[in-house]
Image (cartoon, rainbow, N blue to C red):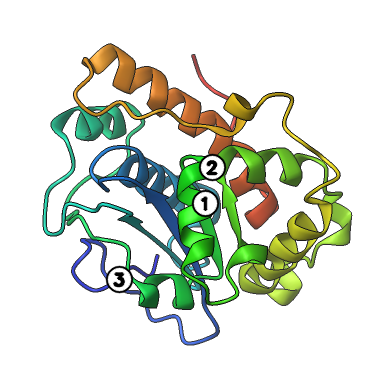
Amino acid sequence: MTAPEGRGIAETAFTGNTFRILHVSTGNVCRSPITERLNRHALTVRLGERLTGGLIVESAGTWGHEGAAMEANAEAVLADFGADASGFVGRELLDEHVIRADLVLTATRDHRAQVISMGHSAGLRTFTLKEFTRLVRAIDPATLPDPLDEGVVERARALVRAAAALRGWLLAPTAEADEVYDPYGAPITFFRSIGEEIHQALDPVVTALTGVPARPSSL
């Protein structure tokens, strides 16, 4: 999978269009690194390294710990899922990140508001992770481009447009339903519960992006 320079995953030889997914939290050492790496892992498992070349998955923090490693408990959570935590470097969210992103998925509504307040016409492509999950579940996969015929990039772009069109029609049952709470400083048990929460929210998103459902668990 294509990755930003210095983020620990080598680029592939993909030469077509790209679609950039940006995960945003506060410090970019807990929630957004977990989400970034779980997303990359799930995409690669479902499509293989060659077919995910057009998808760039990265993260940043609104109060990002620039240059920092992710929290040790976040690394442990990724190991639980078999995802790669190596080479991660924390980043502070910059205008250029928002400008380049085709889809911004935030941990909370406050993060979403902060991204949108930066401008760059980000409103129609910025969602909380759980909000996007809720909207994606309502989209008929048959209305999206076939990834084998038109590619995952075109499918991803169509998915974002469809989700934006549904916003305002499918509201969260409670405000808290769209939040992923911050585990910073918490014990590993809370980190693992947040990791599972993120994993469950990502699953339908990755299925919608790729057209490939998750493999049944062997457990």
Residue 92 image-quadrant placement: bottom left
Which mark, by number, is residue 218?
none
Compared to residue 135, the image places residue 18 above or below, namely below
Q: CA distance from mark 2 to mark 3?
A: 26 Å
Q: Residue at x 19, y 53 (%)?
A: 88
Q: Amino acid at mark 3?
A: Pro
Q: Which residue is mark 2?
A: 109
* Residue at figure coordinates x 52%, y 53% from the top left: 113
Q: Nearer the viewer, residue 119 or 135?
A: 119
> Which of the two discs, 2 and 3, labels the residue nearer the N terminus?
3
Q: Nearer the viewer, mark 2 or mark 3?
A: 2
Q: Secondary structure at mark 2?
A: helix
Contact, mark 2 vs mark 1 (Cβ under 8 Å): yes
Contact, CB < 8 Å: mark 3 with mark 1?
A: no
Q: Is residue 35 left or right of residue 92?
A: right
Circle 3 packing at 10 Å, graded few (<14), some (14-19), many (20+), is some
The amino acid type, in three-letter code, at marker 1 is Arg
Residue depicted at x 46% and y 68%: 118
| Residue 158 drawn at (x, y percent) | 75, 67
Q: Which residue is mark 1?
A: 112
